[in-house]
Image (tube, rainbow, N blue to C red):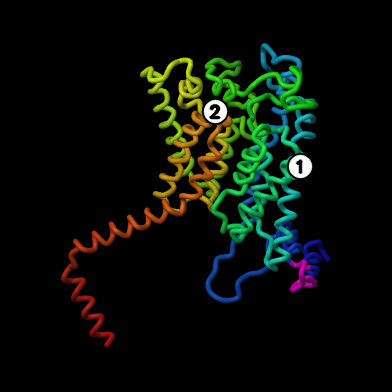
């Protein structure tokens, strides 16, 4: 008897018992469910929610691996000095960089999945329903959007809050109105703001976050810009490829772009939301660049650095690109109508850059913009649907019925009688 058959026998044994949801979650994670509908027409497909979530995880894995290398690279470069002539294989893709990044990032992944899935299993057993697969993606997103030096206990508290308050109280997967990963990020930001600024280079072994000079040695691009400076040590290629400080998975715009294309061609994510969010961010960036060009604000203003930053370069730094590709496109919390997706995405990009410039806490705004639009997504869809109905009713009032259509209808009515 094969492993699949043995697991099926165990599944039959646990059917109807308290721990059945927990076992079924493990069984269907390894194998496709062997149950089909017994009545009515249906389409049999190998795809299900778990496989959809796994597709998103595949798109995130390159960002995770890159983040491990980058964590080690930022550490050694901050201590030894950044190389004058950068070499990808000699300075970045090294075993020392990967090992240091792995032992730092993997515990964050383990805590994220361990705490989140444990709560999912507990709620499934208590409520007596199947374990929902929504946290498979959330568990991977959370480690990628937090600073690499986030304390594990702090992350565990935030994950518990995000899963319970941001998801389970609304009824679980498919019922939540806020993106769970961003709810966790928002909790960390408001509860522990000094750890969530993300404006400094991480160095392994630092005793205190704001400790000695050899513990913290520099700032991110957004950190420099938020102080009004327009000069920093990172080139456009560094920002595009991701050789800059930042949260674990948000630095490489190239890998984020490739992941977005993968999700679009696999029909998992909406290209309308991605494109409209990019347009919205470019529009807001152009407005700020125009204000600076018109000399409406003084050079010494604290907003000058971010407002004068080239409008299209906002997509290369911070978490804007990552949020647009992997979070704004959440099918549960985003808009459902096609026109609504254009409005929803545009406002996310537009407000992300606006909040980034005016946010007094720290220079980022994409997660706040997405959470705000999560709340307004149902309203957007409501008015889009109402607008469609009004236009159709207006066309119906002015429509003319062809005589042949009327005769045919009368004939059919007579024949039926």
Judge whether residue 47 can be spotted in this image.
no
Where residue 170 appears, x then y in whole percent?
59, 59
Q: Secondary structure at mark 2?
A: helix
Q: Residue at x 72, y 46 (%)?
A: 157
Say which of 249 and 416 sits in front.
249
Where residue 87 appears, x then y in whole percent?
68, 18
Cβ atoms at labels 1 and 2 below 8 Å apart: no
Q: How much space separates mark 1 and mark 2, taking CA atoms?
A: 31 Å
Residue bearing the label numbered 2: 316
Where residue 374 appears, x then y in whole percent?
51, 48
Image quarter hosting the C terminus: bottom left
Q: Which residues are magenta?
A: 11-20
Where residue 323 appears, x then y in whole percent?
56, 39
Q: Secondary structure at mark 1?
A: helix
Does the magenta-highlighted stretch encompass residue 18?
Answer: yes
Q: Residue at x 41, y 51 (%)?
A: 380
Taking the view exactly as shown, the residue that stands out farthest to the right is: 1
Image quarter hosting the N terminus: bottom right
Which disc, if any, is residue 123? none
Q: Which mark is nearer the camera, 1 or 2?
A: 1
On screen, residue 330 above or below 241: below
Taking the view exactly as shown, the residue that stands out farthest to the bottom is: 417
Residue bearing the label numbered 1: 153
Q: Earlier in the sequence, mark 1 or mark 2?
A: 1
Does the magenta-highlighted stretch encompass residue 34?
Answer: no
Q: Residue at x 75, y 22 (%)?
A: 211
Q: Residues within 10 Å of mark 2 (few under 14, many from 20)?
A: many
Q: Is residue 171 left or right of residue 374?
A: right
Q: Residues within 10 Å of mark 1 (few under 14, many from 20)?
A: few
Say which of 299 and 232 sits in front.
299
Q: Is residue 407 left or right of residue 363?
A: left
């Amino acid at each position: 008897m094969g492993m699949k058959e043995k697991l099926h026998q165990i599944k039959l044994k646990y059917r109807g018992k308290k721990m059945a949801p927990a076992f079924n979650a493990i069984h269907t994670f390894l194998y496709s469910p062997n149950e089909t509908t017994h009545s009515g027409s249906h389409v049999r497909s190998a795809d299900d929610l778990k496989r959809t979530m796994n597709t998103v995880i595949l798109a995130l894995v390159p960002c995770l691996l890159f983040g491990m290398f980058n964590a080690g690279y930022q550490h050694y470069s901050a201590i030894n000095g950044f190389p004058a002539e950068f070499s990808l294989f000699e300075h970045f893709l090294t075993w020392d960089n990967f090992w240091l990044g792995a032992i730092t990032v993997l515990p964050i992944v383990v805590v994220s999945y361990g705490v989140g899935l444990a709560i999912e299993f507990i709620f499934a057993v208590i409520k007596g329903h199947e374990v929902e697969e929504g946290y498979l993606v959330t568990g991977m997103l959370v480690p990628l959007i937090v600073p690499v030096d986030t304390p594990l206990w702090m992350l565990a508290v935030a994950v518990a809050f995000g899963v319970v308050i941001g998801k389970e109280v609304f009824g679980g997967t498919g019922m939540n109105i806020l993106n769970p990963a961003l709810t966790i990020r928002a909790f960390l930001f408001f509860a522990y703001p000094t750890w969530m600024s993300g404006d400094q280079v991480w160095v392994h072994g630092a005793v205190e976050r704001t400790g000695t000079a050899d513990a913290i040695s520099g700032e991110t691009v957004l950190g420099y810009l938020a102080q009004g400076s327009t000069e920093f040590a990172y080139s456009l290629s560094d920002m595009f490829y991701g050789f800059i400080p930042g949260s674990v998975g948000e630095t490489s715009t190239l890998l984020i772009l490739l992941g977005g294309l993968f999700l679009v061609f696999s029909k998992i994510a909406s290209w309308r939301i991605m494109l409209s969010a990019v347009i919205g961010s470019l529009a807001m960036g152009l407005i700020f660049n125009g204000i600076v060009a018109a000399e409406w604000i003084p050079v010494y203003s604290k907003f000058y650095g971010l407002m004068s930053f080239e409008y299209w370069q906002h997509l290369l730094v911070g978490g804007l690109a990552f949020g647009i590709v992997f979070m704004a496109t959440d099918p549960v919390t985003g808009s459902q109508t096609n026109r609504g997706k254009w409005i929803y995405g545009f406002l996310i990009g537009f407000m992300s850059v606006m909040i980034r410039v005016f946010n007094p806490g720290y220079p980022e705004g994409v997660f706040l913009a997405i959470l705000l639009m999560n709340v307004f997504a149902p309203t957007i869809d409501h008015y889009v649907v109402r607008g469609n109905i009004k236009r159709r009713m207006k066309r119906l009032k002015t429509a003319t019925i062809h005589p042949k259509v009327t005769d045919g209808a009368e004939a059919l009515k007579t024949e039926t009688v």
